Each structure stands twice: as structure tokens, then as C-alpha cells.
Image: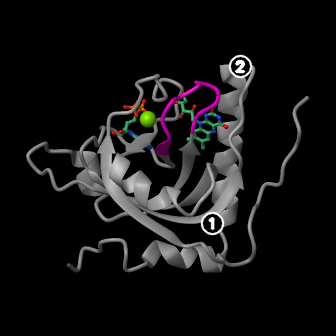
Amino acid sequence: MTTTRPLIVGPEEPISPYPIKLKGEVVQGFGRGSKELGIPTANLSEDAIKTLCHDVNTGIYFGWAQINNNNNDNDNKDNKDNEYRVYPMVMSLGWNPYYKNEKRSAEVHIIHKFSEDFYGAELRVIVLGYVRPEKDYSSLDALIKDINLDISVALNSLDRTSYNTYKDDDFFLSDKS
Ligand code: ADP
Ligand code: RBF
Ligand code: MG
């Protein structure tokens, strides 16, 4: 039943409409316990989604992400340590057929283990390619397995020179500012 799919996607270098750059606030999601499943997803605000939805299809994407937590009063050590770091990410844009959502959502899973949450922070994302369309699943287990495969695909696909360079893009804040 399980179909295999390629472990690397997209051309040797990103082509139009990529790179797509977006930023927005990390908001409360649906609270379905993605975190408990080991795949927390930072949900983007409506405004950020609007800038994106006009030109792209729903589905799963990969690229780079950065969290900018200016909220220094909550002394988030992990975020401090990792300030300005850019991480690989997978993003789900769409209707989440498995959950039969009414509203379109954009959720970003950053491929890094953080010790604290970062609700309210600014999230910057550079989308560099498309992995697959959204699917409906017969079980939560099947969904999780597919997401883990998406993560491998993202890491392999980003591990090419012309994708790697976007890590240092001016869109991401640097500590020189
Ligand atoms: P929600 O339904 O509110 O989106 P989740 O279970 O999806 O809840 O958890 C998302 C939250 O977890 C994010 O808003 C963020 O604060 C935190 N988080 C911690 N680690 C990560 C990560 N690696 N990627 C994305 N979000 C993370
Ligand atoms: N939801 C779906 O209904 N179908 C999908 O194909 C799907 N793919 C996803 C791929 C990735 C990389 C991520 C991060 C999420 C995906 N989701 C999908 C959303 C998922 O339902 C949501 O994150 C849940 O909150 C997980 O419990
Ligand atoms: Mg979420």
C-alpha cells in the first residue's frame, strides 16, 4: 500500500516562483497536540498566509527558517543561544484533509529541537521547493510516517550548494545589525 517516493526533489537550483520569502507572527494553532507527536508546527498569522496563497498551491514545502524573539523579558536561553541561526524547515500549506479544516493554514515545522516555545515571535521563512500535495490518511500513524519522510526529503534537497546559499540570504537577520 505504501508507495515509495523520491528522497530528493526539485531541480539543481531553485527556479520561479522560488525563492518565496515570508514573515509573520507565530500564533496559536489548532492545539491538536502536534508537539506530543514529535512534530510541533509554528502556525503563521493570517496576514502572512495571505501574502503567500495568491501564487502557490496547497501542499508540503521545504526551505529555511529563522525565529526572531525580541521578547527579551522571557529569558529564553535556548532562543538566545540560537539567535540568528537559520534552520531547515518543512511547511504544510492547506486544508489538512485529515482534520477536515475549514480554514487554510500555514504551519512550519523547524527541524531542530528547541527547549522552549516561541509563540509571539517573528518567524521568517524562505520557501525553496515543493515536496508533495496534501493527502487524507486512514490513520494518524500514516500521517506521521509521511511527515517524517518529508523531513528527510527536505534535508536531502537543501543539501545542495544552490539551496544551501539561501541560509545566508539578506532576508534573514544577522548579528551584525
Ligand atoms: P499549536 O497547535 O499551537 O500550533 P503545536 O503542538 O503545533 O501547537 O506546537 C507549536 C509550537 O511549538 C510553536 O508555536 C512553537 O512555539 C513551539 N515549537 C517548539 N519547537 C518547535 C519546532 N521545532 N518547530 C516549530 N514549532 C516549535
Ligand atoms: N495534514 C494533512 O491532513 N495531510 C497532509 O498530507 C499533511 N502533511 C503535512 C506535512 C508536514 C511536513 C507537516 C508539518 C504537517 C502536515 N499536515 C498534514 C498537517 C498535520 O495534520 C498537522 O501538523 C497536525 O497538527 C499534526 O498532528
Ligand atoms: Mg501547530
On-image quarter of the C terminus: bottom left
Q: Which mark is residue 158?
A: 1
Q: Nearer the viewer, residue 46 or 74?
A: 46
Number of marks present in the image shown: 2
Q: What secondary structure is the magenta-colored segment mainly?
A: loop
Q: Nearer the viewer, residue 61 or 118?
A: 61
Picture quarter with ligand 1: top left
In magenta segment, residue 103: yes
Q: Nearer the viewer, residue 60 or 77?
A: 60
Query: Is residue 61 placed above or below 106 in the rendered structure?
Result: below
Q: Nearer the viewer, mark 1 or mark 2?
A: 2
Which amino acid type is shown beneath numbered disc 2? Ser
Query: Of label 1 and label 2, which has the lower sequence position?
Result: 2
Helix, strand or loop under label 2: loop
The picture quadrant where one finds residue 174 is bottom left
| Circle 2 residue | 139
Range of magenta residues:
95-107
In the image, what residue occupies the spot 45% across and 29% down? 35
- Estimate the x, y position of residue 23 in percent, counting from the top left: 36, 61
Q: Nearer the viewer, residue 76 or 68?
A: 68
